[in-house]
Image (cartoon, helix red, strand yellow):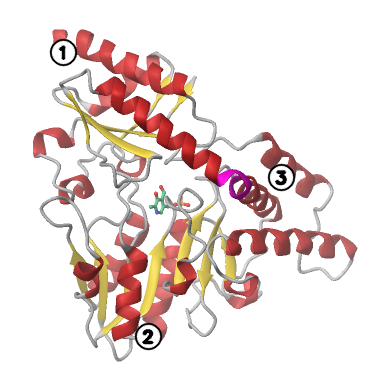
Amino acid sequence: MHYLDNAATTKPPETVCQAVLRAMTENFGNPSSLHGLGVGAEKILDESRAAVGAQLGFSPEETYFTSCATESSNAIILGAAENYGKRKKTVVTTAVEHPATARPVEKLEKNGFKVVRVNPDKDGKFTAESIASAVDEDTFLVSCMLVNNETGYILPAAEAFRKIKKRFPDCITHCDAVQGFLKTDTRDLSKTADCVSVSGHKVGAPKGIGAACIKKGVRIAPLLLGGGQERGFRSGTESVPLIAGFGAAVKLWAENAELYRKNAFALRERLRERLAAMPEVVINSGGDCSPFINSISAAGLKAEVLLHFLEARGVYVSSGSACSKGKKSSVLKAFGLPEKLLDSTIRASFSDDTALSDIDALADGLQAALAQLCRVR
Ligand code: PLP
């Protein structure tokens, strides 16, 4: 099997599975319970919280567990509007956000807020100033992702936030850092971002666990009300096994981050070399993109057909973005991808365990698809 859909989700390593199992068999207490089993479970939360927060520059007290990054972003965006959107009515975001940000922002728009969506320039790039200059005195929230999930493009979120904070210190800055978490160095993100959303399952943790980091003093109204867990931000008994897995995954990544990043650059290089020999194939992700995400268009081949052709050879990729489920991607369009390629774009995304043999299998598969599928068209 050649799994190249790691931006959709990753395979948890053995150490993560062991941490999850231990939390279910040995530390099955409720972390809110006062007895020893509860204390043992609480210790897992403390350790994982510190590990996740540290990679984003936030303290454990500023780090909250959620069920996924979608929940984190929804809670932050809607919760910021509840507390800061009484007098100020504008939200600034980009035209290339993941639906986890785009949908709650649309909800605010439907409820009467003004939304400014910053587009990339004609070359498909953003500058910090293009984002910062969209903010004015009426803006209470700016939400900008760190790494785009469809192309790997790295947005100048931190620099834009720095400019915004200088001009409008009260404006809340939120970063969806899901695809950049650990894959880029995010340990300084707290210097400019008030709030950050991340997901566990993109870095080897189980699915169903995420985190929201919220700077001390920033008041985000909670989405879930109840027993007051997660210091009132997210009521509901914490999923100790998933949090144990999240902590183990983050520790493993953090210890090997340099190695994993180097590996991703080498994989991207090999991909470029191999695809350079195929004139019908274009790599849409430029040199300034994350090496972990590669958007590839094969003119004349439908992405879905290509995906299944590759799958039959044991190569797993996604069509555009896993979340768009075959719909034409408005994000790729915003990045300036020609209309005729929107339907012909797949995404190959890497993780710590991706090898050169996976890249070769993809390239061989693409070559075979061009030879066989183009002939029957
Ligand atoms: N933001 C980005 C950039 C993503 O790529 C994803 C998932 O693909 C999400 C948010 C949502 O993450 P989750 O699956 O944890 O809700």
Q: Nearer the viewer, residue 57 or 172?
A: 57
Q: Please tell me in which quadrant of the rendered image residue 264 appears.
A: top left
Using the image, determine if residue 71 lies above or below residue 16. below
Q: Residue at position x 33%, y 83% from top?
A: 166
- On residue 20, the disc is 3
Residue carrying label 2: 84
Which residue type carries mark 1? Cys
Percent coordinates x, y for residue 36 in the rendering = 89, 63
Residue 255: in magenta span: yes
Residue wearing tag 1:
374
Horizontal and vertical percent for residue 262?
Answer: 48, 38
Q: In the image, what residue type sits under mark 2?
A: Tyr
**Disc 3 from disc 1: Cα separation:** 46 Å
Whether the magenta-drawn stretch holds residue 361 is answered as no
What's drawn in magenta, residue-wise? 253-257
Residue at (14% x, 33% y) in the render: 341
Circle 3 crowding by C-alpha within 10 Å: few under 14, some 14–19, many from 20 = many
Q: Which mark is residue 60?
A: none
Q: In the structure shown, which secondary structural element does the residue marked by tag 2 occupy?
A: helix
* Lower position in the chain sequence, tag 3 or tag 1: 3
Badges 2 and 1: C-beta atoms under 8 Å apart? Answer: no
Distance between the alpha carbons at the discs numbered 2 and 1: 55 Å
Local crowd size for mark 2, using a 10 Å CA cut-off: few (<14), some (14–19), many (≥20): many
Question: Can you tell which quarter of the image residue 350 is in?
Answer: top left
Q: CA distance from mark 3 to mark 2?
A: 38 Å
Q: Secondary structure at mark 1?
A: helix
Say whether residue 370 is left or right of residue 56.
left
| Label 3 vs 2, first from the N-terminus | 3
- Numbered-mark total: 3
Q: Identify which amino acid the numbered label 3 is placed on.
A: Val
The crowd level at tag 1 (other Cα within 10 Å; few <14, some 14-19, many 20+) is few
Side (left or right) of 10 relative to 129: right
